[in-house]
Image: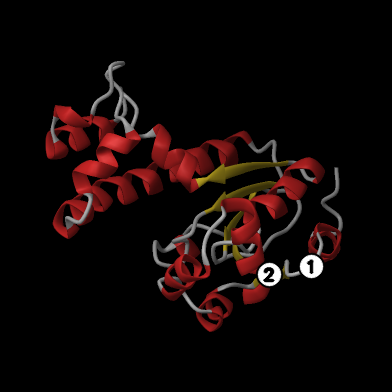
Amino acid sequence: MGEIKKGKTNIIGITGGVGAGKSTVLGYIRDNYKCRIIFSDDVANDIKKKGFPAYDRLVELLGPEILGDDGEIDRAKMASAIFNNKNKLKSVNNILHPAVNEYIINIIEDEKTRGELDFVFVEAALLIENGYDKIADELWYVYASEDARRQRLKDSRGYSDEKISDILSKQLDDATFRAHCQFVIDNSGTLEEAAEQIDRKLKGFEL
């Protein structure tokens, strides 16, 4: 893993638990630094479209019944096709995860070749599990206290305490995130407080 410095396109992976506010933090970075933001969930949606390799493999695996009237994969129909079927879910993930990684790596290589940006930020919930430490110059962890995360999930998504507890129990714990990431942003409070931490870290890269 390298280090971030001027004169090159730095690759930074951003991760953190649900409700930590990764999108809010990245919105600030996008507006204040010369960068490109890649959201892995957006890439996962893009590569399921007709014309991309994952499309054909998913239709072959799950059948044409997952298609909508427009011939594209219907998210609800696909979710229904794999509901309560761990084997199918595993097969879908075995298609999507490598395809997402390859797509993101291609974007990164293109931006490095172009050399016009200071940063490419890659946001992914499974950043650590998918080996992005081998791709990125640094991994960043967006931390927020459990109380803050719970309140955000209630306010933004209307989740119940039970649902939130279930989600949190399936995610990496704080110690694991900290062990794998080189920089931690405490986003328990306001965006202004998080922005101060980011600006201190990236001083000298302002637009």
Q: How crowded is mark 1: few (under 14 residues within 10 Å), some or many (20 or more)?
A: few
Tell me the SS state at disc 2: helix
Picture quarter with the C terminus: top right
Residue 56, placed above or below residue 154: above
Report which quarter residue 138 is drawn in.
bottom right
Q: What amino acid type should be assigned to the residue bearing mark 1? A: Gly
Residue 81, placed above or below residue 74: below
Q: Distance between the residues labelled 2 and 1?
A: 8 Å
Where does the image place residue 171, in percent across and percent down from the top left?
A: 45, 71
Tell me the SS state at disc 1: loop
Towards the viewer: 127 or 106 = 127
Residue at position x 25%, y 46% in the image: 95
Q: Can residue 145 be spotted in the picture?
A: no
Residue at position x 18%, y 59% in the image: 86
Q: Is 206 left or right of 171, judged from the image as shown?
A: right
Residue 43, placed above or below residue 185: above
Q: What amino acid type should be assigned to the residue bearing mark 2? A: Ala
Q: Which residue lies furthest to the bottom in this view?
A: 175
Report which quarter residue 43 is drawn in.
top left
Residue at position x 62%, y 75% in the image: 146
Picture quarter with the N terminus: bottom right
Mark drawn on residue 189: 1
Where does the image place residue 96, in percent across and percent down from the top left?
A: 30, 46
Mark drawn on residue 156: none
Towards the viewer: 65 or 97 = 65
Figure colour scheme: secondary structure
Q: Mark 2 points at which residue?
A: 148
Q: Is 48 left or right of 127, judged from the image as shown?
A: left
